[in-house]
Amino acid sequence: MRDVVIIGGGLGGLGAAYALQQHGVPYTLIDYRPRLGGSIGSRAKAGFIYDTGRMFTPDRQPPRHAAV
């Protein structure tokens, strides 16, 4: 077992693992899914590749900030 354990192989976990690896820190990454990436992924259909996963689309206009 390593001193650092990362729970979750989504973007945050993969980012943490990458940063630790760049600094030579050993780690163990644990995820319950058979593949890494969390909710992101891609699928090929009819010659196209589609990105899948969570997306954010605001349902209202962002607030306007007062001019300084």
Image: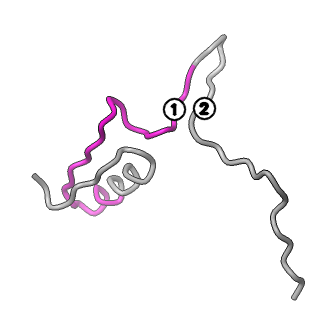
The tag on residue 7 is none
Q: Which residue is situated farthest in the right direction here?
A: 67
Q: Is residue 13 left or right of residue 53?
A: left
In the image, is residue 62 above or below residue 48? Answer: below
The residues bearing labels 2 and 1 have C-alpha atoms spaced at a distance of: 6 Å
CB under 8 Å between callouts 2 and 1? yes
Q: Quadrant of residue 47?
A: top right
Amino acid marked by disc 1: Gly
Q: Which residue is situated farthest in the front direction here?
A: 59
The tag on residue 51 is 2
In x, y percent, where is residue 46?
A: 66, 11
Residue drawn at the location 31% of the way across and 58% of the way down: 22
Give the residue at mark 1. 41
Residue at disc 1, secondary structure: strand
Residue drawn at the location 26% of the way across and 44% of the way down: 30
Task: Out of 13 and 32, give the one closest to the viewer.
Answer: 32
Residue drawn at the location 36% of the way across and 31% of the way down: 35
In the image, is residue 49 above or below residue 28? Answer: above
Please provide the residue range marked out in magenta. 19-43
